[in-house]
Amino acid sequence: MIDTVTLALTLLWGVAIGCIYILMAAGLNLIFGVMKIVNFAHGQFLMLGAYMCYWSWFLLGINPYVAVLLSMAIVSVVGILVERLCFSRILGTSKLNEIFISLGLIYVFDYSAVMLWTDKPKNISTPFEYSALSFGIVSISYDWLISIAVVSVILASLFLLLEKTKVGRAMRATSQDGVAAMLMGINVNRIYMVSFGVGSALAAAAGSLFGIVFSLNPYMGSIPAVKAFAIIILGGLGSISGAIIGGLVYGLAENTATFFLGGIWRHAVAFAVLILVLIIKPTGLFGEGK
Amino acid sequence: MRILGERMSEKQISRRKYLKYAAAGVVAIAVGGAGYYYYYSKPTGTTRPIRIGLLAPFSQAEGPDMEKASKLAIEEINSAGGVYVKEWGVKAPLELVIADSENASPEKGVTAVTRAIIENKVDLLIGGMSSAEVVASQVPAIENRVPFIITGASTHLVTRRGPQGNYGGLPQGSPQRIEDAEGMSYMFHYCTTTFHYSKSIVHFFGEYLKPIVAKDRNFKLAIIYRDDPYGVGVLNASKSYIKQDNLPIDIVAEKKYPPNTTDFHAELTAIKAVKPDGVFVVDFTVGTAQVYIQGQRDVGLNSMYMAVEVCEQPEFYSLLGKWGDHQLLESKFGPYAGPPFYLTLMNTYIPKFKQKYGVAPGMMGADTYDAFYVAKDAIERAGTLDKAKVRDALESTKMKNMLIVTQTGYIEFGKTPDTYHEIAPITFMEQLIWRDELSETRPLIVWPEQVPGIGVIKQKDFELPPNYVSG
């Protein structure tokens, strides 16, 4: 018999881990929504973000939560460079080109990281590492609470960027119809660049938080990237709200499956939910059919 | 008469001369014999270095550690003149041949070992890390009759899957069984197996911890493990020893998860719900550290966590931070449990290793280091590099313990089906204690009290973790 506290805790952790997936998926969805490219190397931006946060903390002594911002800034520049040097050159050509460029980037980033930081795992210590907030028999560490708060702030900022700024409107317009946006005087190439930069920064934030609450290594990006793809398909391609709901649903499905059925069902059940949603609504929870 | 007399006189002289000639002859024969012996007992061919192949994963942390330990052993042996080969009448130096399995890949391992045997013509092989890697890579050595001292791989199959080991319990028709008894006789295992450490761990829980935390009931144990042959192997061996040795332990939770999992919250929440007395974690460094951390920091499962010896790595301590304080680690070589260390040799080996390479030695390197001395001893006793004779010499090895402690105090390879060509190592339990000056924990041996051939190895009394909540 499962007691309610245990069940509540399981759901709590589902939501908590879902928050990190949301950031990752939102970035991926932004890039796909605007540029219509599938970037398999998105997980490598997460890894790079984690290491930037680690370096800022380890070498410069910056508070890891402040280092999240620095990491986002650095990785967004890397993202822009990747977009300019790789993806912008092959936009509109075969989808295979996009796939192989992103697959190639995975190896380039992973092996560069091994050279720079070795393959040994590392961790980031925060001032709140050993503190937790207790609610009777339930307690949650400050690091998790701050991480959830950071995700909320970043998502709110993303919402404001997309809804309340000129660049955001241009991004949404490009996402809806790139040619029409261009005809309306929007510099689509610039919007592609900005979108890729913002998407990469979101992955960097996810990576930094992941590094704080877990640990980091050069290959850490691959599994979250697969999950991010599942989440954006679940939530609906191109929809940021879909990424948020999809991330939470995925996190909850993963954790409840693990709790009730065991860890080996973790991915199977989460992907079963994905298949079920696609059967019922092929465009995903918040996706719009053309 | 004169003539006769002369003849007599000649005869007398002749006898004297005869004696002189006889004496001269004896001397000549002795000198000649000595010369002959001296001439023909010299090396018959050109002496050459003794080539030892090292199978190691150089894309992982363990590979470089094994190489460093090998080079240190070779340097020591060569600087003392090398290995005496009676057949040659001289000492020959050891030469290292690297067989890189990259990330302990079975395919890369097979290629590397084959190349070492065919192209580099190694006299003997040492090394190997993972079970899958060694099970595949040992095949060329079996086929080519090359003695192989395997210093990694926790599976017993590496020496027991032939007829001498009753095929390691493999069912008939299993592709892992090896029918080539002669080839299998060249395999030697200088490492703990799943059976060794699983037995040691459950005995520690059942005999040592049970009276402390569960006086009037069975010890409630939760096992959380990787869903791969390593994790499943440890689980099965542990359950089998609990039953076979009638230990007062109830397994209250068995939670498996896919390898490379990083989020253990759901598993640990479920474990917390069954209120265990101890949590046995079967994973490598990162996974184990995450279970320790997430269990205490996030889930509030304030229990006693036990990790397996593969976690005896520097990054385990750095990842754990304070969450490792008062927790447990099973080990067979504790480079961090000192100084002073529990073995005399460690007091020279560890500083020498650190001085030469600037890093602390790892566990995989310790087995490798010892194996070079085992090889030296066998070659010297064999008096030849003939592989069959070296194999025979390895079979009769009886050396005093070096860095790995054994049950008899000697390095000996088993001969019965359930110990075939394995050493009988002793594993011990370390308790990690927080050290402010290092900002990390460091281990101290808490069990057993003493071991044969060495005496007392215990470094501190066991203490329950301050936040410990029993079942």
Image (spheres, rainbow, N blue to C red):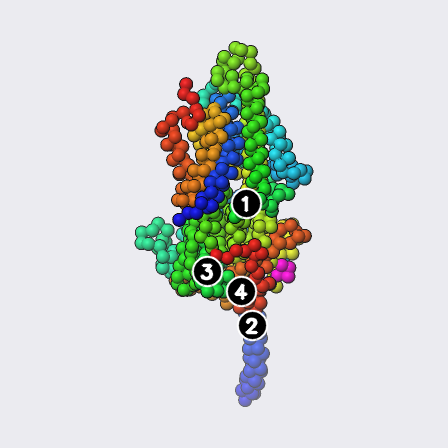
Mark 3 surroundings within 10 Å by alpha-carbon count, few (fewer than 14), some (14 through 19), many (20 or more): many
Q: Give the amino acid at mark 3.
A: Phe
Q: Where does residue B349 sit, x and y in percent of width and height?
A: 62, 58
Query: Which residue is tagged 3?
Result: B219
Q: Nearer the viewer, residue B328 or B172?
A: B328
Query: Which residue is tagged 2?
Result: B30
**Pair 1/3: label in front:** 1
- Label number found at residue A135: 1
| Chain of the residue on which disc 1 is drawn | A
Q: Nearer the viewer, residue B263 or B161?
A: B263
Decide if residue A64 is on the left or right side of residue A230: right
Q: Residue at horizontal 50%, vertical 16%?
A: A178
CA–CA distance in space, label 4 to label 3 = 19 Å
Tell me the SS state at disc 1: strand
CA–CA distance in space, label 2 to label 4 = 61 Å
Q: Residue at horizontal 55%, vertical 17%?
A: A170
**Pair 2/1: label in front:** 1
CA–CA distance in space, label 1 to label 3 = 30 Å
- The N terminus of chain B sits in image quarter: bottom right
CA–CA distance in space, label 3 to label 2 = 78 Å
Q: Residue at horizontal 55%, vertical 77%?
A: B22
Magenta segment, which residues? Answer: B338-343
Q: Residue at horizontal 60%, vertical 49%?
A: B321
Query: Which residue is tagged 4?
Result: B448
